Image (cartoon, rainbow, N blue to C red):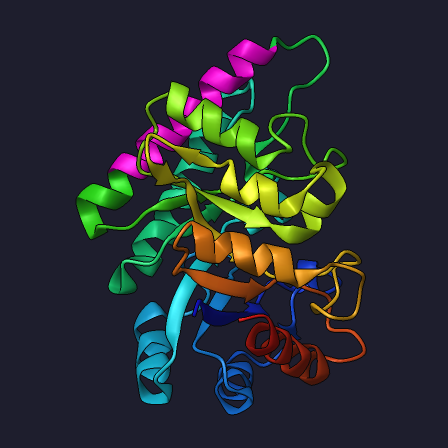
Amino acid sequence: MPRSAITICAVPQAASGPFVFHGDFSENLHLAKKVGFDAVELFLPGATQISASETKAMLDDLSLGLAAVGSGAGWVVHHLSLTSHDEAVRRKGVEFVKSLIDWAGRWSAPVIVGSMQGRVGLNEERSEVLKLLSDSLRELSSYGLAEYGSKIFYEPLNRYETNLFTRVEDAAKWLESESLDDVEILADLFHMNIEEADLAAAIRESTRGGKNRIGHIHWADSNRQAMGFGHTDTAPIASALKSIGYNGYLSAEVFPTPDGKTAAEQTLRSIRTSF
């Protein structure tokens, strides 16, 4: 059975974002444990505002794992992109993600590249932007593996958030073509509900070279609420995940609707029912 994770946001500028718990950081860690999650996924403002050593002590005390760390504050707060045509901005973006890799290094935990991937802008060549993305992911992946044995999760987003890769299979093919063998895909079911014709088929078809490229799942319903509060049918998705031998996390990156505790409890209920 896949392990469960819950998102905790510590970025004030993302207070209206799709994260289950906002506000007091320590209190949210305890609440994640109380509800019954295996791990937390953290959305941090950066690598210096919250102590990694103190967080590790708290997580160890609560017997909670760290599923992943999101890098989206690099875009939301600092407007950094790994594919910016401005080399200085791109370097700052790479260094921002590296600092989060360092922060998560105590757990050898993955760092997510989602909104920081950027997009192809007006008068830009897609091939050139993808080259920048490939170079950035390669540098970050090499750094994480060499220093901490950790990985990068790349997240295809929906068409309203990026025009790079919006479908899981396309991202898997591209990662293979670039020999980015240690970069894994974060498959977000909310984004997939917009872009994929068949969510279960997309999961199965992300296998390349005998290895499935999916390393992390955002367990979110069609309306980006907790699974079970929308119209997503989880049975074929669960079957597909079982068929590829998925043993990573199912993480709730969803809106706290009607409130965080209810969304968290519903997420766990849906996971247990589905698996």
Above or below residue 188? Residue 54 is: below
Q: Residue furthest left?
A: 146
Q: Nearer the viewer, residue 191 or 13?
A: 191
Answer with left or right where residue 261 lies relative to residue 32. Answer: right
Q: Quadrant of residue 224?
A: bottom right
Residue 135 painted magenta: yes
Q: Position of residue 120 (x, y in %)?
A: 65, 20
Measuring from the top left, give residue 124's x and y in whole percent. 64, 10
Quarter holding the N terminus is bottom left
Left of 200 or right of it: where is 48? left
The stretch of residues the image draws in magenta is 126-142
Of 151 and 118, nearer the camera is 151
Indicate the position of residue 229 as horizontal and vertical percent values. 79, 70
Q: Is residue 258 magenta?
A: no
Q: Is residue 122 visible?
A: yes
**Residue at left 26%, top 35%?**
142
Q: What residue is at 46 percent from the left and 65 percent from the top? A: 49
